[in-house]
Amino acid sequence: MIVRKDVKRMITIGNQAPPAPGPAGWERGALYGRDAELALLSDLVTRGLAGAGGVLLLRGEAGIGKTALLGTARDAAVGQGGRVLSAVGVQSEASVPYAGLHQLLRPVLDRAPSLMPRQREALLTAFGMAEGAAPEMFLVGQASLDLVSGVAGGAPVLLVIDDAQWIDGPSSEVLAFIAHRLDAERVAMLLAVRDGHDTVLNDAGLPEMTLARLDDEAAAALLAARAPDLSLPARDRLLADAAGNPLALIELPALLDGGGGHAPVPWLPAARRLERTFLARAAELPEPVQTVLLVAAADDEGDLVEILRAAERMAGQEAVLGALDTAAGAGLIELDGHEVRFRHPLVRSAVYQAAGPSRQLAAHAALAHVLDDQPERRAWHRAAANTGPDDEVALDLEAAALRALDRGAPRAAAEALRRAALLSDPDTHRGRLLLRSAEINFELGDAAGARQQLSEARFTRLEEGERLRLTLWTEALNEESWFTPARVRSFAEVADRLAEAERDGAALGLRVLLPLATGCWYGNPTQETRDLVVRTARRLSRHDGDPLVLSIAACADPVREAAWVIEKAAGLTPESLGDPAEQHALGASLTAVWAFELSWPFLCAAVDGLRRQGRLGLLGEALASQAWAALHLGKHRLAATAADEAGRLSRDTGRPRWALVADLAAATLASERGDHATADGLIRGTEAELLSVGAQSILGFAQFARGRHALVNNQHGDAFEQLARALDPSDIAYHPFVGYLGIADLIEAAVRTGRRDEAEHHLARLDDLAAKTTSPYLNAMAAYAHPLVASDEEAEPLYQRALQSRLSSWPFHRARLLLAYGRWLRRRRRLVESRPLLRAALESFDALGIKAFGEDARAELRATGEPVAGAAPSTLDRLTPQELQIAKLAASGMTNREIGMQLLLSHRTVSSHLYRIYPKLGITARSQLHLVDLGGD
């Protein structure tokens, strides 16, 4: 099944002739009956190498033809003047971080000096070839992308990754990152994954092609060409056993007794049968050759010297190159310079599995002995060579985990710590290692893994502080009963004891408490629970105005704590926090108490800092928060670019809920621009996804987007119904803190539909909330709403007072009030007085890029008798949000490489974007960008 539907054409290839008998025909045989797949692959490689990018993940059972297709693509790329970089996953080293990526890029690492310094440092640190701060995976990904892009500048590149299910996690994440950024590159990527294996690549959203088994006719023709002398019973038996697996049809005839094809063999799955036939071939080789093959099967690098040295160590005698020649002659391996490759992944697994436990352990021990200069690989081979608890090996693996953290691979570090724990004694290091692995998994969002490790650690020896940490994490991860006062009290007691027992105990308690406080904002706990959370945070406070305490208070109890949080936060600056993660936490928490103007500098600093550090997961979250803050502050163009980038990054980093929050901001902006089809599509799609994943707590944002969409379309009745849902405790979308974001719209919709009682009720709620929280944003909304609800006699002074003072810092609300006041005057036939207000409203909406409200202002102004020209197309209408972002950065003087670093694109992709941007803006060169109004907030 081909998942991607955007392949427009296929190159026609004639039917493949059946392969001739003999070893040389195996690869062509595996491709027999694959005309459509070959055509698709040929087209993809041709387009990719020509500069249109191209990615395909091949999926199927063992022997189905994945490796053969990759080999054909490799030959085609070389025939078109391309360069091929390849890697093969090896199960025994799937836990070594960035091993697969290093294998792929090793032939071109001599070009690393051409990278920008930060990129070069990140890549070499990830590979353990340089010392440096732990790089974020996406910075490693960008460095890899730029490295491959630079190689493609000389000759197009094909990236080939076989057995990708055994490529280590960090490398798989980088490969997914690269795959999504090849549209403008002369690079194609092909990956093969065996069915039944879990891998990061399964959820990467890559175009896939599943290879099906051959139909009966094709299978019979292949078998007849491969083994023409088979008897009819043997032929029928083999066809039934092979079940359309092409490699099985090629290799299984060799298992028949005497080669005559008369004796049936016991039934086994096709993959097992293939392993048997490869193993039978290997078993005929001399023992020194079998030893070399086993070491090669256990080794992931395929390095000839490394394999021979380990084989010598294992066999106790010198291994000679002739052993490899013998194995190659048997059709089991291929030699390419100093690289050893198995002819098919099943050959590797057959050789390894058939060796038996003792010889497998010996092979790993031999490899560990020769890898003194590669401590991480050495640690994993030592672990694989061990059969029971061994604290020395466990500590070696713990050191590998620390190096993985230093190299920016926390998932690999958590796995190394878990494996180290299994190798250590319960009375020595096991509990400590499990606890550290659980903490890393918690930070990565793997709550299930953390719970499992904490459960195992309970029965091991732990120091007092470690036991307290175990209890703290266990309490924090007990989601089912967290929001009861008893559970919060239990957590608080442990946190207090930990703060006394360890120097960083209070900081850890606050760090664990923050996501739980965030749960209070999204959930609906009792007031007693909210009070307990806030009191616990204040007791753990490290100093007056502790930003973590402010964040916890803001999220746990927005209404009661807003005034205190706003007062304390006003005395802080982004520079006083320093860490971008803390800046993000405080900025996002300030939006929880409707303090958007206070949140703004913290969110901007967080976005800049997280971008510099390459921490893209948090960057996506910060950009989503920035998009919503910008929307409420009237910074609509910046909101559009932030929402667009937040959605892309959040999907790239596996944070779909944040992507949906960003999409709802984008939907609101699309409504205001008058792009109603886009807005409606985004809202519908987001609601469906939110319901499917059980994220009802985010539906309040969808109601805000729906309400604003209806309001700008002058569907005031629908706007009222949609916005009221978020404030109705009986509704699935109930979320009062989000509902208050749209309360001014709700009041306007109530007034415009004659629901005066409801308008007055909600205005009273708004006034009460604004007074309690001291939020300038809520006070601005109240200033906008009061004249709408007031009687004719009282309205005008309220309009004037709000325009003179209370809305001076709120351009969006001010523009809407100018429109409302102008409409109010026009309907009282005070046409001359209304025109300046309506004109000012129109200019403000045009400047903000809010086409929908701008059209309302135009209609009102025309109704006064003043001629008004139509709206000129805005920059946002001509450019996508990403193109606008690139244009602004280029206009500021940044180079393509610098823009690529900031937006996680290759410099060639940036160049391609700019060449599409110029004609849209009516210019021909970068030097003219400063002449174009690109907007500003």
Image (cartoon, rainbow, N blue to C red):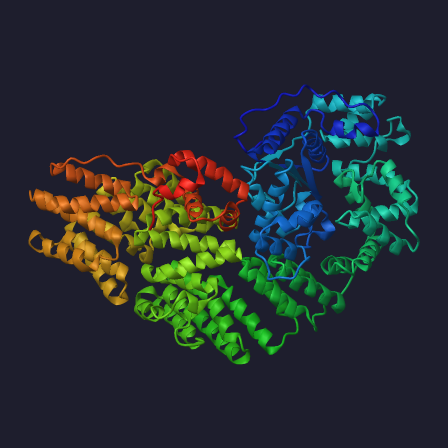
Q: Describe residue 524's horizontal placement relative to residue 262 as left or right.
A: left
Quadrant of residue 761 within the rendered picture: bottom left
Q: Describe residue 914's horizontal placement relative to residue 131 as left or right.
A: left
Q: Residue at x 51, y 47 (%)?
A: 900
Residue 210 point in image, percent of width and height: 62, 34
Residue lying farthest to the front in this orientation: 927
Q: Is residue 754 visible in the rendered structure shown here?
A: no
Q: Describe residue 854's horizontal placement relative to residue 294 as left or right.
A: left
Q: Which residue is drawn at 40% across and 55% down?
A: 625
Question: Which one is nearer the viewer's eye here, 508 or 185?
Answer: 185
Residue 857 point in image, percent of width and height: 20, 41
Q: Describe residue 377's horizontal placement relative to residue 405 as left or right.
A: right
Measured along the vertical axis of the image, is residue 872 above or below residue 704? Answer: above
Q: How many numbered marks have been drawn onto this rendered protein structure?
A: 0
Measured along the vertical axis of the image, is residue 745 above or below residue 61? Answer: below
Residue 203 point in image, percent of width and height: 56, 44
Question: Which one is nearer the viewer's eye here, 571 or 293?
Answer: 571
Question: Which one is nearer the viewer's eye here, 759 or 230?
Answer: 759
Residue 699 point in image, percent of width and height: 37, 50
Q: In which quarter of the image is the N terminus?
A: top right
Residue lying farthest to the bottom in this orientation: 500
Q: Is residue 316 visible in the rendered structure shown here?
A: yes
Measured along the vertical axis of the image, is residue 298 above or below residue 676? Answer: below
